[in-house]
Structures are given as C-alpha cells and as structure tokens.
Amino acid sequence: ARFTCARVSGHLPMGCCVSKGGADGTYAVSNKSRRELAWRRTGIVGLRDAHLKDIPSVLFSDAGLCNVVKTLDVSNNRVTVLPEAIGVLTNMKTLSLSRNALRGLPFGLSRCVHLKTLVLDGNFLEKLPADVNFYAPLAKLTTLSLRRNSLADLPDAIGRLTALTHLNVSGNNLKGLPSTIGQCVKLETIDASENQSSTGEFTVPKQLGGCAALASLVLDGSAVQTIPSAILTGCTRLVTLSLHACPVVLRELEETPGWFEYEQRVKGKHGKKITGNVLIDGARGLDDGVDRREARIVPHSGRV
C-alpha cells in the first residue's frame, strides 16, 4: 500500500527544531521557522539531547519536509515509541535513535527503503520484528547497530539484509547468531561481544563461513566455546578474531582446519609492525590473538 504523509499526535503539532526541549519532554517553539528552513535546506534533522518524549510530528505531516529528510538523529532523548509514520521518510539514509527508551520497532520503518545506517544502541529492545517483509525492503541497509539492548535472539529474517556490511549486537542477552546470518554475504565486521545468555554457550553458526568478506569477528565475553572450521576456511579475509574471556581451548582451536591460514593472514596484516617490533612483547611474543601462557584463549587484537 502506498504510504502518504499523515498527521501524527504529538505535544506540538507544529513541531519545531531547537537544540533543547522542555523539561517535561515537549518540544520548544523558539526559532521554529529558521530551524525548519535549515532542515529543508540540508536534509539533516538534529534532535540530540533535546529531552524529547516524542519525535516532532511536523516531520511526518509536512509533505515537503518528508521528502527531503536524509538524516534524522534523535539520540539521547526519552522517546518510547517510534511512530508507524516514520515510513513517510522514504528518502532517509541515516536514522539514529540511540539512548532512548524504545521497546519495539514499527513495520513502517521497512518503508524507509533508502536507509543505509540504523543505530538503536542503548534502548530497551527485547526482540526485533520476525516478519521477512520487514527486512526485505531494506535492501540498502549497510550498518545496523543494536548495542546495549535486551535482545534474547535475532530473527531468522535478518538474513534478508543482504547489503549489510557492519553489524553490532554487543551487550545484549543473545545465545548466538542465527544460521541465516550467512546470507548476509557482504558482512565485513560483526561485534557480538558481551552477550550474557542464561543458556550459557554462545553459538557461532558454521553458515557464517559463507561471508567471505568478513574481516572482523569480535566475540569477547560471550561464552563462545568453539569456532566452526567453516568460518576459518570460508572467511578468507578474516584478520581479527577476538575471543577475550571466552572458554575456548587453545589446543582445540589450533587444530581446527583453517587456523593456520588465519594466523598467516594476521601476521601478513601486521608485517610492517612486526618488523619494527611494535607487536612484540618480551613476555608474550607476537600478539597473534592468543595468550599462549594459558590453556584457554584470550585473543586479540587489531580491530579493523
């Protein structure tokens, strides 16, 4: 169905733009014309640290403004609900809602078909939409950051984000990554560190080996016990595998097919630094991501 601009209830239907809102979460009215003119001219709507409880409704009710918004930053406010009408911002490329109080995402977000960067760090999200039709239209999304939420799992449908290159799900309650993550073949970096799941072990699926472009996989503190050989052999650009505080047995990892090739890539990446002894520690030797004084691994390392 075609999505058109609609009026959305809010504290101020005129919705203006000042750097700070009122203490009660309403949006101040000063300099309305000048600031809305700046929004229209630049396509950048900056609403950080404005004490907002709601996103100004003018963004969704003014057809001319709907069409020009390219960046919307509502970080560090008190927004509890992202309105369904967010879908009218069809030309938006960057949306940042970090450090708010969101508990869910509206289906309307899927209509932001030009969205490239979505930042939702530091909210109260416990789950993401499971509908494949939510993700499929987001064919241009390259960066998804969900740090410090309360996610217990990622839906299988996330595999439909085929343009995704950077995924950050650190600081949640995940018990692993879904096998469908292997469909995100353009992934270059994944940070799934510090996930504390009640089930214990954090599962890294072998299907991730299908992401040949993956260069950085950070899993510190997420109770990873094994790394499938398919990842070490299939992710031929992997040069950062970080497993600090993970119960991985060093000997078993060294015997995993593909580990030797991974180590060679790490050494090749840092070749010039090694020559200058930059990565040499007198007690530990080359920092290839492994603490060889312990029975368990405490990698690494130079993140990309």
Image: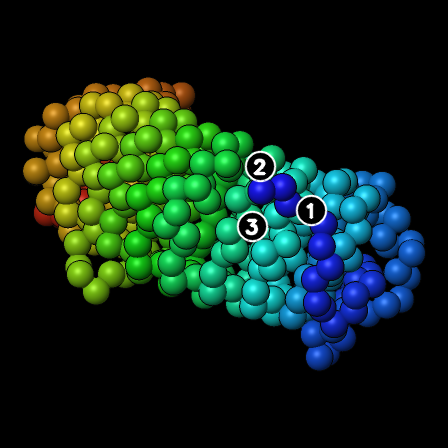
Q: Name the residue under label 3.
A: 108
x and y, in percent, of residue 290 in the image: 22, 39
Q: How far apart are marks 1 and 2 (CA)?
A: 14 Å
Which quadrant would the C terminus be assigned to in this image?
Answer: top left
- Residue at the spot 79% in from the left edge and 65% down from the top edge: 13
Q: Is residue 142 visible?
A: no
Q: Is residue 250 visible?
A: yes
Q: How far apart are marks 1 and 3 (CA)?
A: 11 Å
Q: Is 145 situated left or right of 100 in this image? A: left
- Residue at the spot 33% in from the left edge and 31% down from the top edge: 183
Q: Which of marks 1 and 3 is nearer the N terminus?
A: 1
Query: Secondary structure beneath disc 3?
Result: helix
- Give, as a three-letter code, the residue at label 3: Gly
Which mark lies nearer to you, 1 or 3? 1
Verify CB contact (< 8 Å) between mark 1 and mark 3: no
x and y, in percent, of residue 139 in the image: 50, 32
Q: Is 178 situated left or right of 273 in this image? A: left
Question: Residue furthest toward the front?
Answer: 1
- Give, as a three-letter code, the residue at label 1: Thr
Q: Distance between the residues labelled 2 and 3?
A: 10 Å
- Residue at the spot 39% in from the left edge and 47% down from the top edge: 131
- Give, as a three-letter code, the residue at label 2: Val
Question: Residue furthest toward the bottom?
Answer: 24
Within 10 Å of disc 1 (Cα), the crowding (few <14, some 14-19, many 20+) is some
Q: Name the residue under label 1.
A: 4
Q: Mark 2 points at which residue?
A: 113
Numbered label attached to residue 55? none
Q: In which quarter of the image is residue 158?
A: top left
Query: Secondary structure beneath disc 2?
Result: loop
Q: Nearer the viewer, residue 145 or 93?
A: 93
